[in-house]
Amino acid sequence: MLGNLLRRIRGQQSPPSCGSRDGLILVQTAASLLQPTHRQALLNQISSLTSLPPQHYAMLMRQAIERYGRFVQQLPASEAHHHANLGGMLDHGLEVLTKALRLRQGHILPPGAEAEKIAKLADLWTYAVATAALLHDLGKPAVDQTVTLYDADGRRLARWDPWSGPMDQVAACTAYTIEYRRDRRHRFHERTTPLLAHHILPREALSWLASDPEVFSCWVAAISGAADDAGILGQIVLQADGESVAANLGAGPPERAVGGRTKPLWERLLTGLRFLLSEGELPLNRNGAAGWLVEDDLWLVSKRTIDTLRGHLTAEGHSGIPSSNDRVYDTLQEHGILVPNKDRAIWRATVTGDGWRHDLTLIRIPAHRIWPDPATRPAPFDGQVIPITDVEESANQAPQGAAEKTARTDEPGHVGPPAALPSPYEPPPAAEEHEAASHDATSMERAEPAFPGNTPSPNVPTTASAKASARANDPLGGRDPNDAGVRFIQWVRRGLLTKRISVNNADARVHTVPEGVLLVSPVLFKDFSSEAGDESWEHVQKRFAKLKLHEKLPDGTNIHRYRVSGPRRQSSIKGFMLADPGLIFDGSAPAPNKYLRRADSTE
């Protein structure tokens, strides 16, 4: 039986799907896993880049790599994104390690230290960079994947428990299958990595890393996903990770296209959509979602989806992503990814759920293009998506003149009688996006969503006292949760709560001052746009300004300037001022930064 199993595994013409229930994958030794030519080439580069004495390299670096290979076996690095093939996690780990070591050569570590200390700690910093790069995805098998173990006769043994050690330690285990957990949490694997590091690094290695408090602090932060606290070490690992991901997805320098290795645009668009949906970046099947799965169709809010997809691919380093949404629609339609509405890509439809209803502009995608395996699909939407025909739309429109006809374009747009409230799913028309942040309050209130319990029916005027009461209980005033400005504020709140966004230090994006809270611009908006894979930072900043949560200067401008007076330097920063710290801090805000003074201050 074992012979048949081995022949079955080795004789496969192509690796089985990661979610396959039938394909058994052979458990291999570290030597076998590292034997392929491309991995040997990476190992040779790693050896030359570490510059460790041979004995130390074998004990600390080579042993860690072999343990890592033995631990991750042929697991993929993701379900439908980068390195999603068998062996993808091992390839990705080695690639990030190699790239991080190359980047490390361009930095003097620790920054600002004396020459004697730099020389003394050079190898330790190199090792910290290397191991943080290797381990950065180690938590995925524990929280993102379910690995089932089998014996030589193909009988199921048990689920693999990564916390207990490598799967080859389980008695009689010779093969395994892989499935992705439907309930996995986005980026939770980063927090679990430190708990698994002892399975990969020898005790001597952990003791060495812990011998210097600064190195150890940065290293722990880096493998935990806390890039801000990891300093330059975290930046190196993030950049190396991004380069590996971009190369695998066909992004990177234009010259890659010469060798025919760059993936076609439609494939990159589809891969990006699968990733955004699997990670919850495009939420589904609820009020305020980006899409709804009904039977065999996935309906996605058109502009929100494509803008988010473009931002995600651009952040990954892809070039040649069209700036025109029409061009993206055409590409998806040409390759059967998008179901057309006659000669158009956009559908107008009514989405109804339990107690809510919205008329939206949507794109329609066959569910099998996103989830080839029906077993991996999310639960269907408990509601309806009803396309609006041209006849129905014409019947609902009373002649309102040229101005209204101009506003009712395919997207962004609003479908339904003129008296209906705007949809909370599509940003306002392009002309409104470019209006000054000092637009009157009437337009701001008009953009608030029609959520049950928050907003009265379209035919009942909202009183000023009711609005004031709502804003007293909710600092964001019940505003559209899909608005880029609202999502930015919520992201800042989460970042401060989890310590991912630092306050009042040299590299902080947020500073408390006697006048309130300074949000450093534009860098904080760029951070949000890059991390969220969202709209451009300029658009996010405009939407934030339209919320009118910030304090303007007497001359009507938005940006406040401060002098930074430190023991070693004089500099300046600028940004938006929040007079109410409660908008972003839970509880009391930190004491004001004593090194900041208003640029116009005479103190």
Image (cartoon, grey):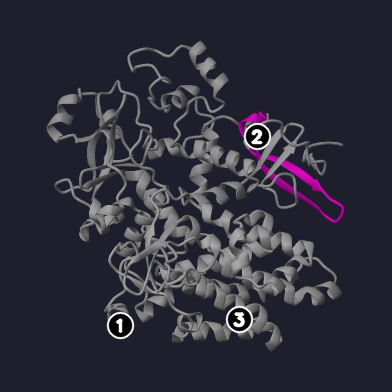
Q: Nearer the viewer, mark 2 or mark 1?
A: 1
Left/right placement of residue 233 relative to residue 354 reads right
Say above or below: 147 vs 262: above
The quadrant of the picture occupied by the C terminus is top right
Q: Is residue 340 visible?
A: yes
**Label 1: element kind:** helix
For badge 2, the amino acid type reads Phe
Whether residue 563 is in magenta: the answer is: yes
Say above or below: 399 vs 46: above
Q: Nearer the viewer, mark 3 or mark 1?
A: 1
**Label 3: element kind:** helix
> Measuring 34% from the left and 44% from the top, which residue is drawn there?
303
For badge 3, the amino acid type reads Arg
Q: Nearer the viewer, mark 3 or mark 2?
A: 3
Q: Residues within 10 Å of mark 1 (few under 14, many from 20)?
A: few
Give the residue pinned by disc 1: 3
Mark drawn on residue 62:
3
Say above or below: 140 vs 573: below
Q: CA distance from mark 2 to mark 1?
A: 62 Å
The percent coordinates of residue 214 (x first, y second) are 77, 62
Q: CA distance from mark 3 to mark 1?
A: 32 Å
Left/right placement of residue 418 relative to residue 392 reads right
What's drawn in magenta, residue-wise?
559-584
Left/right placement of residue 98 relative to residue 55 reads left
Q: Are marks 3 and 1 in contact (CB under 8 Å)?
A: no
Say above or below: 299 vs 259: above
Whether residue 296 is in magenta: the answer is: no
For badge 1, the amino acid type reads Gly
Whichever of labels 2 and 1 marks the residue nearer the N terminus, that label is 1
Q: Quadrant for residue 117, please give it.
A: bottom right
Q: CA distance from mark 3 to mark 2?
A: 45 Å
Give the residue pinned by disc 2: 585
